[in-house]
Image: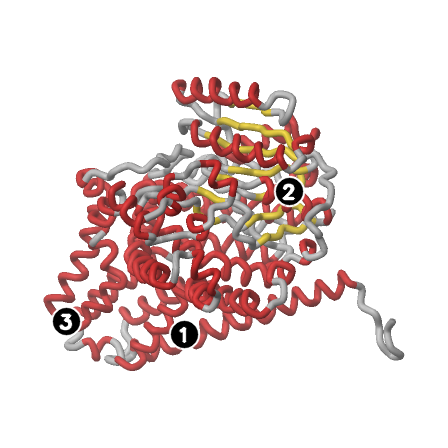
Amino acid sequence: MAGRGTTELPLSGYADRRIVGRRTLFATLVVVTIVILLALAAYALSAGGFGIADALLLLFFVLTMPWSVIGFWNAAIGFVIMRFARDPVATVLPSGACLRGDEPIAASTAITIFVRNEPPDRVIRNLDAMMREVELAGAAHSFHLYVLSDSGVSEIATLEETGFSALAAQWQGRIPVTYRRRAVNTAFKAGNFWDFCERWGHQHEFAVTLDTDSFMTAAAIMRMVRVIQSDPKLGILQGLVVGLPSTSAFARIFQFGMRLGMRSWTIGSAWWQADCGPYWGHNAIIRIAPFVAHCHIPKLPDGGVLGGHVLSHDQIEAALMRRAGYDVRVLPEEDLGWEENPPTLIEFIRRDQRWCQGTLQYGYFLFTPGMKLVSRFQLAFAMLMFLGSPAWIGMLVVGTLALAAAPTPADFVRPEAGHALLAIILVMWFAPKIATVIDVLTRPKLRHAFGGTARFLASVAIETVFFILLSPIMWTCHTLFLAGLPFGRVIGWIGQVRHDHTVPWSQALHQLWPHTALGLCSLGLIAAIHPTALVYVFLLAGGPALSIPLAVFTARPALGRFLTRIGIGRLPEETAPPLALTALALPAVTAATRPA
């Protein structure tokens, strides 16, 4: 009861004010941090006066700041919640806090999986294991599996028809399985799902979305169904996605770092994004009716390289769902689902280029009427991930030339200010991973799950070097890809090679020679003129310079098997595999659990 002279605030009004307060605090922290860093950078660059090169470097630095600073504060807030909140998930997803976990599933849910031009054997293996779990949980009557194919290669289409028909026959009378292949993949994956909605959406209340490389347990699917059916305002619920145990050296190291960084970053961002959360296109659940009513993505105007149908649909659909008045939230639990990461650097670059092109199409939607301010920010922020890459490369090129032209390094950058700025940037880069490293090292069970303290720290050290090398390689890739867009260099919706395979030296040289030339020229110039500054230039130039051997060696299956055997990049699912992953007979899990 309210006291005399006070006014009771409705719960929804209180929640809205609390979210506004969080966003105001977060924005203030970000803006103040950027201003301080820019002031420090300007002071550091003023050693020999402030010229055109210094102004360019400061401009490039401004463009790189949003991702670094926002990532840092996401991680810092996420770490505080991880360590000190009684229930970290309930802190960012209130609707999940009151669930017991045994509520009956009353709604009909479609499980949709999207496939395109990839051998279907792994997909069938994953789906069969998932459906066995659903059946054992006694929830088979609530689900219908839809395999939505856009495959255009006749040999693969034949394999799909045979394999998925057999899967449907095997599960007949228990869980219905529908396989549909479109002859033309109009509107790419978004069009694939929209075709499902038009044909079968009216038969179901919710749809779980899976990619070809996705895997979710029955427990995870049922938990997400229970959360979304308990909150009629919830339009999309995104689950946290982690890497599936792999024997590829590249994938092991990459997804170990991803595992370290994702949870604190996601929890921190969910704290202030709240009802304007992310949608990553898979390992999520959607309320179908409002999606059909409000989330159709129109074809963009033809005539430009970014015109036509949208490649990256997910965050646009999240923004449209939120515009319609429905919440979009994330459930930051690490046991909800997995994905296979590309096994080589070459495959990783191919996937990233498609993301780059699709994300740039967000620019058409930034000023959509009625869209929430946070949704507009998310679209712009996603674009900055790629548009910031030329700024990093600009800093490398201009910085190398300016440093080479200076009589001494001290005439280019004030040493004390430069060292302080570098230390701050490195902390910001690694903040999401630092948060999890601290969390793991202070929890004995987690240390054991990651293979013990020695293995964990060795994996952290290797992943740190890997991240320092990989980041500027990807910045170079983005820059080259963006430079090619005006000349019609685009990438379509292509299939992925997911099995472990080697990368020949000739292929690595063909694809990565520009990166190598950039890195070697920068390092060679500084080594010849100011060798004492070489270590600093290496942070931006080392990865491109070593990109060819990195692509070749991290693709070698023998190296991947060796790292798996000694426990480098060990994930908790390898130490104590969930029953669902055991059923998949993953080589990485088998090798990790085999007695020494």
What's the amino acid at mark 1?
A: Leu
Q: Is residue 210 left or right of residue 93?
A: left
Crowd band around label 1 with a 10 angstrom C-alpha radius: few (<14), some (14–19), many (20+): some
Nearest the camera: 369 or 355? 355
Q: Is residue 529 left or right of residue 54?
A: left
Q: Residue 394, how many percent across, how many down?
A: 29, 60
**On the image, numbered disc 3 is attached to which residue?**
530
What's the amino acid at mark 3?
A: His
Q: Residue 379, how many percent across, how many down?
A: 52, 52
Which secondary structure lies at badge 2? helix
Q: Residue 17, how many percent across, how many down?
A: 70, 67
Q: Is residue 365 visible?
A: no
- Check the picture and name the quadrant holding the N terminus: bottom right
Nearest the camera: 308 or 228? 228
**On the image, numbered disc 1 is attached to which residue?**
37
Q: Which label is found at residue 222?
A: 2
125 up-or-down from 274: above or below = above
Coloring applied to the structure: secondary structure
Q: CA distance from mark 3 to mark 2?
A: 60 Å
Q: Nearer the viewer, mark 1 or mark 2?
A: 2
Q: CA distance from mark 1 to mark 3?
A: 26 Å
Which secondary structure lies at badge 3? loop
What's the amino acid at mark 2?
A: Met
Q: Residue at x 42, y 42 (%)?
A: 340
Q: Residue 400, how many percent across, how many down?
A: 21, 65
Most distant residue in the right direction: 4
314 up-or-down from 332: above or below = above
